Amino acid sequence: MKKITTVSYLAACIALGAGSVQAAGFDIGGTNVTFGGYVKLDAMVTETSDGEIGNFLGRDFYVPSLTPVNPGADSATRFDMHARQSRFFFSTATELEDGNKITGHLEFDFMTSFNNNDERTTNGYSPVLRHAFIKYKNWTLGQTWSNFMDLASLPDTLDFVGNPDAAIFIRQAQVRYTHGNFAFAVENPESTVSPVGGAGRFTTDDNATPDFTASYNLKTDWGVVKVAGLLRQIAIDDGTFDDEVTSYGLSVSTKIDFANKDDIRITLNTGKGLGRYVGLNTVNGAVLDADGNLEAIDVTAFSVAYRHLWNDQWRSTFLYSTLMADNDTALTGVGATKTTQSYSANLLYQATKKLMVGVEYKFANREVESGADGDMNRIQFSAKYDF
């Protein structure tokens, strides 16, 4: 039986954004098993101009919707330190009797764990599923990055996402078929809806159909380009409200490589009812009117990141990211988020192939429809060991 190498399977995993590029492997019978991941420490000082970030996720990484906008509130400065982004994965690759290959991948981290998060004593956090998928021929089945998302355009930052104002950042269950540069998928549906007046949020899972995505990936000598489309249904049926509305979106992104090994990464996402797909769900997909009918909310988001290599060990990324929502304030009220934007710059030192340390500064602003806004300033230090 032909041996399936660790290197060949890792290439497939990296193409799907499955995990760290560092891995070790061994064979069990006819199955090649690889494992890897990284340990990462993050320490940050966060200052907010209009109140304190109340949700712990916004203290651990930048979440655009959590920048406080509380006119008249005092500013706040907080220090946080955690190792929750650390992750590990296991992958398998088996050659079948007919000569075809089947692969599997499981990956976990602790970043969004809501269990055992007691910082008084042990700081224990439960593992959280990131990826769980199998790959056979042209098919990918399981949970992984959405086909609507482009990993290549994500910036090289210390922050968990980097450009969440503009990024499509979704992992979910799906069935994907890939043919050449084209990929088509049916993906798990979920929607968020604002009640009339905009106070609160309904999270609905009342869809009769999955989310449909299609993408075209072009790889060239100078970089990569991805064009992706989304078509889905936003539905609510909770005994009080019963309606649905069509949502659609377009994503265009690129990573352009320069001769000096610098690169620029650009993403543009726009659509009607993008909701949870962009901005870490800063804006809901739709809003209910007084008659209980859904109206999709238009969103446009953009980011550009320039990565510069100072030498073989030092590098920096300079980033701008923004999201703009077109709210009908007669329905959403004036407390709905109108825009978010962030700037960041970092300096990263690759001490060895597997050890990186760095520092990053981020400024963020959120404005609501009333015109009120709030700022966030954050300095973050990180150390990361790939294994």
Image (spheres, helix red, strand yellow):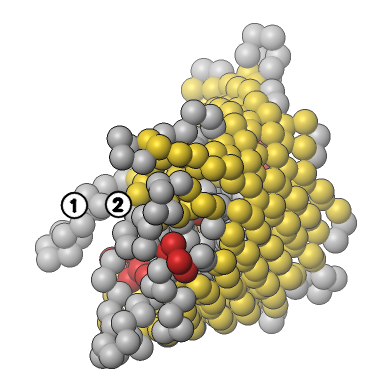
Q: Is residue 308 left or right of residue 71?
A: right
Q: Nearer the viewer, residue 244 or 348?
A: 244
- In the image, which disc is placed on residue 116? 1
Q: Is residue 173 above or below residue 284?
A: above
Secondary structure of the residue carrying tag 2 is loop
Q: Is residue 70 visible?
A: yes
* Residue assigned mark 2: 113
Kind of residue at disc 2? Ser
Check whether the beta carbons of the residues at disc 1 and disc 2 lie within 8 A of each other.
yes
Give the x, y percent position of residue 98: 69, 9
Q: Is residue 8 visible?
A: no
Q: Residue furthest right?
A: 221
Q: Nearer the viewer, residue 136 or 145?
A: 145
Secondary structure of the residue carrying tag 1 is loop
- Which quarter of the picture shows residue 214? top right
Give the x, y percent position of residue 372: 41, 84
Q: Residue furthest front?
A: 291
Q: Alpha-carbon distance for marks 1 and 2?
A: 8 Å
Q: Is residue 383 above or below residue 6?
A: below
Give the x, y percent position of residue 22: 55, 50
Q: Is residue 115 above or below residue 213?
A: below
Residue at 43% x, 54% y: name it.
289
Q: Nearer the viewer, residue 166 or 16?
A: 166
